[in-house]
Structures are given as C-alpha cells and as structure tokens.
Amino acid sequence: MRFQCDTTSRTPIYRQLIDQVRRAIACGRAQPGERLPSVRQLSRELVVNPNTIARAYTELEREGTLLTQQGRGVFVAEPRKDLTKKARRERLDEKLDQLFIEAVHLGFSSEELLEILRKRMEQFAFVSEVD
C-alpha cells in the first residue's frame, strides 16, 4: 500500500492518511492481516513528523481498522462485527442523508444519483453475504 500526503490541502495530514487506509480497505486494495509500514518508516518516506503517523494509526486502531502487535508491527484488522445490524444501519442512514442533501443542493435528479452510485459501487469490495 502506497501513501501520499498533500501539504497544500486543508485536510490535516493525519486525516489524509486515515482516509487513504480506510479507502484502500473498502476498495479491496488492503486485506485483513496485511502489514503496514512502521511509524518510523512511513515518517521517513513521507517526510512527516512521526507523531502525525502515530496519531493516524492510533485513531485507526481505536476504531478497529488497524491492529498493533508489539514487536511485529501494524496490520489491517479483520472487519468489525461488534455493532448490531440496527446500529450499523443507523450509522449508514446518517451518512446517506448527508449524501442526499448534498446531491439535492448540487441539482442532481434521483436517476442521475442512482447511476452515479451504480458506477461508484463497482470500485468497492462489498461483502457478498448479509447477516
């Protein structure tokens, strides 16, 4: 997995890294058990303060996306199943509401939005079974 940071962006670097890891997992480019670069290694590679990398990794670990194993490194965690289906649905509904509000304000029709969603969904690694 390759990381990059845009120092001209208004998005903090640690947030850029978090977004890149989450996107790579969602798109299937990073798999559970895959090892990520160490804080020091990534810090040198990106020429970024190690605390910035550590902050991103800590936040990702807190949310259950990454797993740190002492002496072994940082790994992509198995997908979390600790939220109930209802809680997951409520969380998704909040995000969908934000998307729909933005789509309306940008002047998209429901048909246009559905077509955009269909095309974008092809880029992501959805699970094939629903529990």
Image: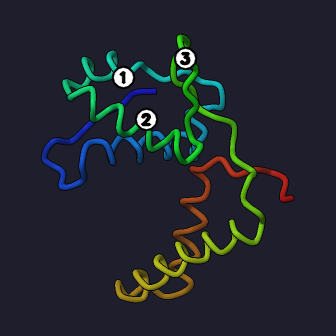
Amino acid bearing label 2: Tyr
Closer to us: 87 or 9? 87
Q: Residue at x 33, y 22 (%)?
A: 42
Foreground: 71 or 77?
A: 71
Name the mark nearer the viewer: 1 or 3: 3
- Earlier residue among tags 1 and 3: 1
Real-space Cα separation, disc 2 to disc 1, in angstroms: 8 Å
- Answer whether labels 2 and 1 touch (C-beta < 8 Å): yes
Seen as rendered, the residue at the extreme front is: 70
Residue at the left extreme of this rendering: 8
Q: Which mark is residue 39?
A: 1
Labels 2 and 3: the sequence-earlier one: 2
Residue denoted by label 2: 57
Does 4 sit left or right of 36 as displayed? left
Residue 70, numbered label: 3
Secondary structure of residue under mark 1: helix
Name which residue lies at 21% across and 28% down. Answer: 49
Q: Position of residue 86 (x, y in %)?
A: 75, 72
Which quadrant of the figure contains the C terminus?
bottom right
Helix, strand or loop under label 3: loop
Of pointers 2 and 1, the one earlier in the residue sequence: 1
The disc at residue 121 is none
Is residue 53 left or right of 88 when viewed as pictured? left
The residue at the point 69 percent across, 71 percent down is 89
Q: Residue at x 55, y 76 (%)?
A: 94
Q: How many marks?
A: 3
Residue 126, percent across and down? 69, 52
